[in-house]
Structure formats: C-alpha cells, structure tokens
Amino acid sequence: MTQSVSEQPAPATAAASSGDGLDIRPVSGALGAEVHGIDLNDLTDAQFDQIHALMLEHLVLFFPGQEKLTPKAHVEFGRRFGEVEIHPFLPKLGEYPEVTLIEPDKGGKADEWHIDVSFSPNPPIASILHLVTCPPSGGDTMWSNQYRAYDTLSAPFKEMLEGLTAVHVLQVPPVVEMSAEHPVVRVHPVTGRRSLYVTRMWTSHIPQLSRQESDAVLQHLFEHSEQPSHICRYRWTPHTVALWDNRATQHFAINDYQEHRSGQRVVVSGDLPTSDTPRKPDYERNGDERYYPRRINARVGY
C-alpha cells in the first residue's frame, strides 16, 4: 500500500470511534497504542487501512490475544505493507523463511537502543513481532519516538544537523561486514515529518565532522533520543503482536529475566532514507590528525 504525503490517512482516533469495533488504548503520551477487537488472521482491506493509519499516528501498535495467528497470516499481514524480506543470518521458521525466530536466551539479546538493520542501504519499513512466550515478569521492550526527539532539539542545533549524514556499521568478524550512510535527519516518505536517524547500536560516525566533534554530537543525540519523555515501555503477555514503524522509532529489549522468551518476526523490506537538504562535504583532516571512520558499532575505541 502506497500513500503520498498529500494523501495522509484520516486521524486514527476518528476511525476508531466510527463504529468499526476497534478499541484503541494509548500506551504512553509519547507513542504506542493497544488495538483490541480485531483478528489478524482475517483482515479486510478496510481494517488494514485503519491499522496503517494507526501505525502512522502512534508509531507502534500492540495487538494482544492473537493466539490463533498462523505463520501464513503473519506473512500475509506483512505483505500488505510491502515486500517481505528473508533475513540473511537469523534462524527461520520451517517452511516459512520470511518468519525469523527470535530466541534471546540462545544469543543476540537486543538490549541496546537500535533501529532494525539500519546498516543496510534500505532499512526495513516496519517490523511485526509475534511474541509467543514471555517470562511472567521482566523482558519489557521500550520504543522511542524519533519525531519527538527531533522536534525537541533547539533551532540552532537543528540547523547544524542539516546536510549531515551518519555511517551505520555491522561488523561480525570474520563473517560479515555491512555499512550504509544515511541522513542524520530523515524525512518520512508518507507523513513528510522529520525524525532523528542515528542509533547507539549501529551508528559509528558523522563523516562531515572531526572525530571529536562526531563523538560529541552522536553522544548528545543518543542521550536525547533515549529520554523517558520520548519513550513507551510495554509489558508483554503471550501471543501479543507488535507492529512498529522502523522509519521513525528505535527500540530496546530489556534484559532483566532468565526464563525462556521466544517470538516470530516478519520484516517489511525497506526504502531509501532521504533528506530534503543537500549532503555537506566530508571533513578534511589537518596534517597527521588521526581519524578512523570505521569504528565498530560505536562501542569500540578508534
């Protein structure tokens, strides 16, 4: 489904009160809403249009009580948003390679703020996670509203960010290295709104700045994006499905549990993050100044 900026969907709150049977419950003041009264196994076109509008408004949606969701319906739900990707690394679900298995106790806990696969030239549009089992307490997930993160920056700081890009890197030596360069401030292709697009897990540096400047700016943007006022925190129940807009959010899976936790995820293939500002030229080093552009995942020193 494709919508232009000039054809934005009607406000979701109006749709939810128009006799469609949906019960919309906001999760926080920043973003997020639970959606009750719908079966994701059997969506009509009208229901999908409502869900799409709700996602654009709330950025992350939660659908509790989806015990009957089949892998086939899960994949078909994702395909309504666009092409569904097959993840090159993560384990798959049997005859449904589009469904990746998320089992943190087997490694790979995502307990750092990140945008899904932002190290790709075309990061995913959206992710759809069906949490099958979860601990009785702990294991919450947080999402951060990157529209709000951008909007609450001062005007001079916003001006400074115009035309800057950031390099996002995945390195798992010697298996894989991927990287991509995206605008620090991207424009959403549907809503036309601006959001921050840097993430603590993957972003290594801003090539238009010196090493020290890049570190300082990124650290400020990371901390600013992660403020509690920009965040919703969700406590899972088994067979809840979460759908989030990967273009304007980042998320963090809290690692505070020991019990088994498992999920099945479908990811909608991405678009090209763009800005409405021309890219500034790269920083030119002075003399023998040390500048190493491929810092690993913003965690290891230069």
Image (cartoon, grey):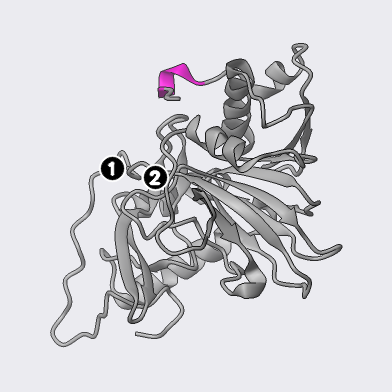
Residue carrying label 1? 277
Give me the residue at 54% from left, 20% from top.
9
User: To which quarter of the image does residue 44 belong?
Assistant: top right
Magenta stretch contains residue 202: no
Please report contact status of discs 1 and 2: CB closer than 8 Å, yes or no: no
Question: Quadrant location of the N terminus?
Answer: top left
**x and y, in percent, of residue 46 in the image:** 61, 16
Location of residue 191 with respect to 210 vertically, above or below? above
The residue pinned by badge 2 equals 186
Task: Say which residue appears at 61% left-offset and 52% top-offset.
Answer: 264
Q: Give the magenta range.
A: 4-8
Q: Residue at x 64, y 20 (%)?
A: 47
Inspect this view and state whether residue 89 appears.
yes
Numbered disc 1: secondary structure: loop
Location of residue 284 in the rendering, given as x and y in whole percent from the top left corner: 16, 71
Q: Alpha-carbon distance for marks 1 and 2?
A: 9 Å
Between 112 and 195, the residue placed more toward the observer is 112
Which part of the image, by quadrant, shows the C terminus? Answer: bottom left
Q: Is residue 32 toward the left or the right of residue 121 in the image? A: right
- Expressed as whole percent of the image width and height from the top left, the position of residue 89 reads 43, 64
